[in-house]
Image (cartoon, rainbow, N blue to C red):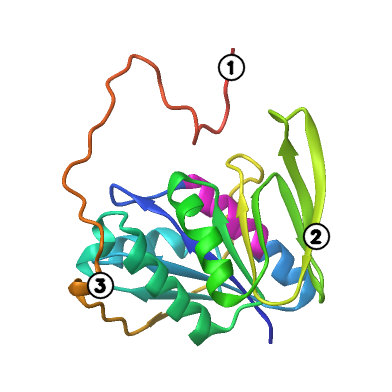
Amino acid sequence: MSTLLTYIAVHDGKIKRSSLEVLSRCNELAAELGWESVALVLQPDATKAIEGLKPYGPAKIYTMSHPHFHQHLTTPLLRAIGHAVKEIQPRVVAFASTEGSKDLLGALSAAHGSAALPDMSEFSIDTEGVSGKRPVMAAKILSSVRADGSPVFVSVRSGSYNPEEHEGEAAVQELSFSFNDADLRTTLREIVTATSDKIDLSEAETVIA
């Protein structure tokens, strides 16, 4: 059975709504195609994320644990996701379009010799590949794009789909992962948060102007 894999972004211990949107779309496509929709969580302790994911209906939740996953360090994330792709062998790997996924998508597609479709506003899947639309020129134009082969790496803009809960009990599988700190070429010294009176609307369900 073919598999759709959704990478679940977690920020400050909370699953990002945009990842649940992507997972829900993958669940829908998997049901149409008779495939399996699964999720991947990378956290020092994935327990809370697992419980938050189960109501959204993945057939299986894969986890990896490592202290470096607490902060967004590209090298260990690339190693971990690459290892998961080799183990799971998905046809499609889907991400929410975030600052983090922009660091990962191109590197993963290059490492696996596969296509990448970034920043999609909608996407569909068939037995040959992935097709969809991507806003370009400040979202004034929608570009129709397609990528064939396997795996295809896709990122999806926040708000493109609605997160949908589904009944079911997801199986959980821990994948082994080790990382040599000598390979860590970047050290995160400090996170500086900008102070602003503006409210972050990137994950808002509804915006009333």
4 or 139: nearer the eye? 139
Circle 3 or circle 2, nearest the eye:
3
Q: Amino acid at mark 3?
A: Asp
Which quadrant of the figure contains the N terminus? bottom right
Q: Residue at x 45, y 61 (%)?
A: 53
Q: Earlier in the sequence, mark 1 or mark 2?
A: 2
Asked whether residue 55 appears in the rendered view, the answer is no
C-alpha distance separating marks 3 and 1: 47 Å
Residue visible at 51% across and 84% down in the picture = 86
Give the image location of residue 95, x and y in percent: 55, 57
Q: Which mark is residue 146?
A: 2
SS at badge 3: helix
Magenta region: which residues? 17-26
Secondary structure mostly seen in magenta is: helix
Label 1 belongs to which residue?
208
Q: Earlier in the sequence, mark 3 or mark 1?
A: 3
